[in-house]
Image: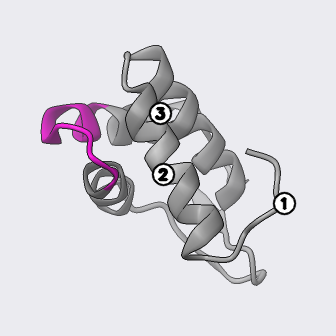
């Protein structure tokens, strides 16, 4: 699976990047790993990075980690300047 980044660049899907991001947002490491694994099997072909983000946020909420998902969204808005994007 390839990931199309916001800037148009493409790279191979790296589950370790998803796991690291989920863990940094505050999820337990085992949850982060499971979400990274499920992300890798959920998508095929080329996928937008925003679709991965949306899927990960949904998975966090489905697994009872609403505060972690909210933390991630807050970081996106405040630190990355993505205010006004759909979350």
Gap in Å between the C-alphas at discs 3 and 2? 22 Å
Q: Which residue is mark 2?
A: 72
Q: Which residue is mark 3?
A: 41
Residue 13 visible from this viewpoint: yes
Instruction: Mark 3 vs mark 1: give the one in front.
Output: 1
Cα–Cα gap, marks 1 and 2? 15 Å
For residue 33, above or below residue 23: above
The x, y position of residue 15, in whole percent, is: 35, 54
**Local crowd at mark 2 within 10 Å, few (<14), some, or many (≥20)?**
some
Between 85 and 46, which is closer to the camera in this rendering? Answer: 85
**Residue 30 position (above or below residue 50):** above
- Binning the other alpha carbons within 10 Å of mark 1 as few (below 14), some (14 to 19) or many (20 upward) gives few
- Residue ID at (82%, 58%): 85
Q: Secondary structure at mark 2?
A: helix
Nearest the eye: 70 or 19: 70
Q: Nearer the viewer, mark 3 or mark 2?
A: 2
Q: Which residues are magenta?
A: 25-34
- For residue 84, the mark is 1
Which quadrant is home to the N terminus?
A: bottom right
Residue at 36 percent of width and 34 percent of height: 35
Q: Which mark is residue 52?
A: none
Point out residue 29 in the picture as x, y percentages from the top left corner. 15, 42
Above or below residue 4? Residue 28 is above
Measured Cα–Cα span from mark 3 to mark 1: 30 Å
Marked residue nearer the N-terminal end (1 or 2): 2
**Residue 78 placed where, x, y %?**
59, 70
Q: Is residue 19 left or right of residue 75?
A: left
Count the marks: how many? 3
N-terminal label among 3 and 1: 3
């Amino acid at each position: 699976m390839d990931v199309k980044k916001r800037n148009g660049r493409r790279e191979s899907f790296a589950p370790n990047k998803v796991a690291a991001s989920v863990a940094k947002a505050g999820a337990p490491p085992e949850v982060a790993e499971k979400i990274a694994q499920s992300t890798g099997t959920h998508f095929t072909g080329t996928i937008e990075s925003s679709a991965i983000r949306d899927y990960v946020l949904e998975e966090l909420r489905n697994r009872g980690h609403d505060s972690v998902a909210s933390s991630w969204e807050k970081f996106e808005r405040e630190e990355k300047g993505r205010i006004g994007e759909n979350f």
